[in-house]
């Protein structure tokens, strides 16, 4: 197999890889702890692994994070990160501090095919999906650039792209975010924002991930919503709401509805 980025590589796939090479699958646990808990990316320094396993890992894996091309600080204290990916395309993440939390808004795609009229990303069309390592990598690279007290506590999938449109990589990334051997974030601290892909919300509810769900609503009637969010033609508001009624919310959890006020379009009382 061609070398894979160990960041974003799933735990079960790593276990399969080890088994295939005659190595006990529990070594995956040790490898993950080195990479995600100790942030040690040099296989030669993973001292509880045998020399032959370290050599095998070096042959088949590497560890790489997206490159931070620039950081722009705003007056409110937030920092916009511009990342350059391996193929030269760029994505953004935004770190937003408050007294009690440090939230990172991450991207899931380069561009987006859903073409919401109020969104810059929507004007680009979809360039490509991000891989799970590029999604997780935003979190790791931002944390590496910040002091201990500013480490990210919450993640929101509200950057570039519709995360459910990049379904498999988003699911893999969320699993790594909440996994005790990987990022160890509580599912309560992760929010996935969707434009309302009803079929994919239905699929997502069976993943047993229990992260927060935010719905980008932006209008309360179909005519207005269709005008600014073409996805509404496929999944009108009633269908979206019915789907949410059947969503298995955990006790004390709620959906969030996002509403961008657009002058003269969706800012009337009626
Ligand atoms: S789904 Fe999100 S990223 Fe895509 S066009 Fe709409 S607002 Fe922009």
Image (cartoon, rainbow, N blue to C red):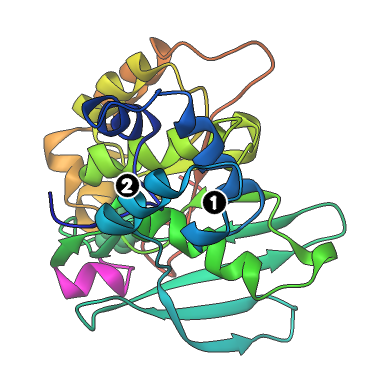
Toward which corner of the image does residue 87 lie, by quadrant?
bottom left
Toward which corner of the image does residue 245 lie, by quadrant?
top left
Q: Earlier in the sequence, mark 2 or mark 1?
A: 1
Toward which corner of the image does residue 246 lie, by quadrant?
top left
Res. 181 visible in picture: yes
229 to the left or right of 74: left
Q: In terms of image quarters, where does ligand 1 lie?
A: bottom left
216 to the left or right of 199: right
Q: Nearer the viewer, residue 202 or 224?
A: 202
- Identify the residue at image location x=37%, y=51%: 6
Mark 2 neighbour density, 10 Å: few (under 14) some (14–19) many (20 or more): many
x and y percentages locating residue 58 in the rendered image: 34, 58
- Identify the residue at image location x=61%, y=58%: 39
Q: Which residue is mark 2?
A: 163
Mark number for residue 8?
none
SS of the residue under disc 1:
helix
x and y percentages locating residue 173 in the rendered image: 40, 43
256 to the left or right of 3: right
Ligand 1 within 8 A of label 1's CB? no
Q: Is 122 part of what is drawn in magenta?
A: yes
- Identify the residue at image location x=12%, y=36%: 234
| Quadrant containing the C terminus in the rendered view | top left
Task: Name above or below for residue 150 compared with residue 248.
Answer: below
Range shown magenta: 117-125
| Label 2–label 1 contact, CB within 8 A | no
x and y percentages locating residue 141 in the rendered image: 54, 69
Q: Nearer the viewer, mark 2 or mark 1?
A: 1
- Identify the residue at image location x=46%, y=10%: 248
Res. 106 visible in picture: no
Q: Which residue is mark 1?
A: 35
Q: CA distance from mark 2 to mark 1?
A: 25 Å
């Amino acid at each position: 197999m061609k070398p894979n980025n160990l960041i974003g590589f799933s735990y079960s796939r790593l276990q399969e890889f080890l088994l295939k090479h005659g190595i006990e699958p529990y070594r995956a646990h040790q490898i993950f702890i080195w990479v995600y808990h100790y942030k040690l990316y040099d296989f030669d320094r993973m001292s509880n692994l045998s020399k032959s396993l370290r050599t095998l890992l070096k042959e088949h894996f590497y560890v790489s994070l997206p490159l931070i091309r620039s950081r722009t600080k705003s007056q409110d204290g937030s920092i916009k990160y511009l990342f350059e990916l391996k193929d030269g395309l760029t994505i953004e993440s935004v770190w937003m501090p408050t007294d009690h939390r440090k939230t990172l808004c991450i991207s899931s795609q380069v561009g987006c095919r859903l073409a919401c009229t109020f969104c810059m990303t929507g004007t680009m069309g979809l360039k490509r999906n991000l891989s799970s390592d590029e999604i997780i990598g935003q979190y790791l690279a931002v944390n590496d650039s910040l002091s201990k007290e500013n480490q990210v506590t919450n993640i929101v999938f509200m950057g570039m792209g519709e995360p459910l449109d990049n379904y498999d990589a988003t699911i893999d990334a969320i699993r790594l975010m909440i996994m005790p051997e990987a990022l160890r974030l509580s599912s309560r601290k992760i929010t996935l924002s969707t434009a309302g892909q009803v079929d994919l919300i239905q699929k997502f509810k069976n993943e047993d991930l229990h992260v927060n769900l935010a719905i980008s609503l932006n209008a309360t009637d179909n005519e207005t919503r269709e005008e600014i969010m073409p996805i509404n033609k496929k999944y009108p508001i009633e269908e979206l709401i019915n789907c949410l009624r059947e969503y298995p919310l955990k006790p004390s959890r709620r959906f969030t509805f996002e509403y961008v006020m657009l002058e003269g379009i969706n800012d009337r009382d009626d």
